[in-house]
Amino acid sequence: MDTILILERLDRLEKLLIGSKEVLTFDEASDYTGISRSYLYKLTASGKIPHSKPNGKMVFFDKKKLVDWLLQHKRGPRLEIRDNAIAGNLANKED
């Protein structure tokens, strides 16, 4: 088997394993979210991302809280935003 194909399969297997975990290590969280390690470090150091340091050294992430953090400030499709704005303007004119 080709070495590149083996590495690609191994990478897919690692991602599947990470997907089934509830608590992620720092490196796993970086891989899972696609956030670079240096930026993830800045986010944890500034307290902008939910994380845990139970022994004062290693950083862990609750996957559910991480997903909630990633999905904060949701934006709707542009047409939905436009329709809501129009509906809001019409409601204000009726008052």
Image: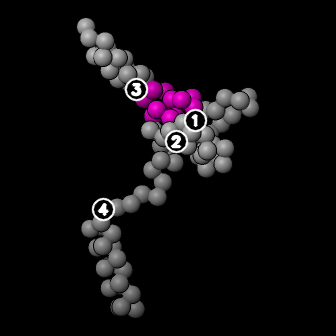
Q: Which residue is mark 2?
A: 66
Reply above or below: 47 against 17. Answer: below
Q: Is residue 27 magenta?
A: yes
Q: Nearer the viewer, residue 37 or 90?
A: 37
Location of residue 91 in the rendering, given as x and y in whole percent from the top left corner: 36, 85
Could you say which disc has been placed on residue 61 in the image?
1
Location of residue 24 in the rendering, given as x and y in whole percent from the top left corner: 54, 30
Report the quarter where the C terminus lies: bottom left
- Badge 1 or badge 4: first in the primary sequence: 1
Location of residue 57 in the rendering, given as x and y in whole percent from the top left corner: 71, 29
Q: Nearer the viewer, residue 95 or 52?
A: 52
Disc 2 to disc 1: CB gap under 8 Å? yes
- Label 2 and label 1: CA atoms lie apart by 7 Å
> Disc 2 on helix, strand or loop?
helix
Residue located farthest toward the right when viewing the structure as drawn = 56
Q: Choose top left, top right, bottom left or bottom right for residue 27.
A: top right
- Looking at the rendering, the stretch of residues picked out in magenta corresponds to 18-32
